[in-house]
Amino acid sequence: MTSRALTVGFDLDMTLIDSRPGIRAVYLELSERTGTYIDADLVVTRLGPPLEEEIANWFPADKVAEMSDLYREMYPTHAITGSLAMPGAREAIDAVHAAGGRAIVVTAKYEPSAKLHLAHLGLGADELIGNLWAERKAEALREHGASVYVGDHTGDVRGARTAGALSVAVPTGPCDAAELRAAGADVVLADLTEFPSWIASYASA
């Protein structure tokens, strides 16, 4: 590690929070309101990419923007209270702070919605940057000087590698450990409960 102050980035959905119950509820409400069939159980097995990519599976191209806006409008009412912190999430952020570092969240999620999740769950990140997916996450990681990025998706691995940050992956989302390693993850942990001991070792190296 360099002498630069430690900054660790975290993905949000299925890394820090289990947003499946809330997201499922929003899609069910969207289906009800629009009369359009949506397999909400399928949707929550592939969280990570931008909302518009998922919406395009259920609505015609000329309706994607409108339906995405409607989804985001309904999200605070239906998704926040049903979503939970992932095991070890609070401890992971606390461990970064204990190592003298800053913990930032870089997510593809709509930023206002992401902020509601952090506030509701009391996850004390120092900064949150939303609306960035895969390689574009590198923009925020570079801007904030993150040397580590933690995520659950191969898109997160690509973002870390594009930024020149160490990719730490957890197979708690749609991608298993083998997929994450194949994508180029430098470290694969079972889940965030293993992160505090890892970051303590990394920070002292």
Image (cartoon, rainbow, N blue to C red):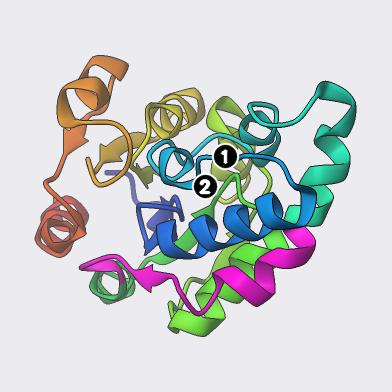
- Residue at point 65% right, 41% down? 51
Q: Tell me which amino acid carries mark 2.
A: Gly
Q: Which mark is residue 145?
A: 2
Asked if 99 appears above or below 38 in the picture, the reply is below
Magenta residues, as a range?
72-89
Q: Is residue 73 magenta?
A: yes
Q: Is disc 1 placed on a helix, strand or loop?
A: helix
The x and y percentages for residue 158 are 44, 24
| Cα–Cα span, label 2 and label 1 | 5 Å
24 vs 75, nearest the viewer: 24
> Quarter of the image containing the N terminus?
top left
Residue at the spot of label 1: 142
Q: Tell me which amino acid carries mark 1.
A: Arg
Residue 110 makes an appearance in the image: no
- Residue at point 37% right, 61% down? 16
The x and y percentages for residue 37 are 63, 39
Asked if 4 appears above or below 178 in the picture, the reply is below
- Residue lying at the far top of the rendered structure: 182
Residue 66 makes an appearance in the image: yes
125 vs 71, nearest the viewer: 71
Q: Is residue 85 magenta?
A: yes
The x and y percentages for residue 38 are 59, 40
68 vs 158, nearest the viewer: 68
Asked if 91 appears above or below 48 in the picture, the reply is below
Q: Residues within 10 Å of mark 2 (few under 14, many from 20)?
A: some
Q: Is disc 2 placed on a helix, strand or loop?
A: loop
Tags 2 and 1 in contact by the CB under 8 Å rule? yes
- Residue at point 73% right, 66% down? 74
The x and y percentages for residue 67 are 80, 44
- Residue at point 67% right, 50% down? 31
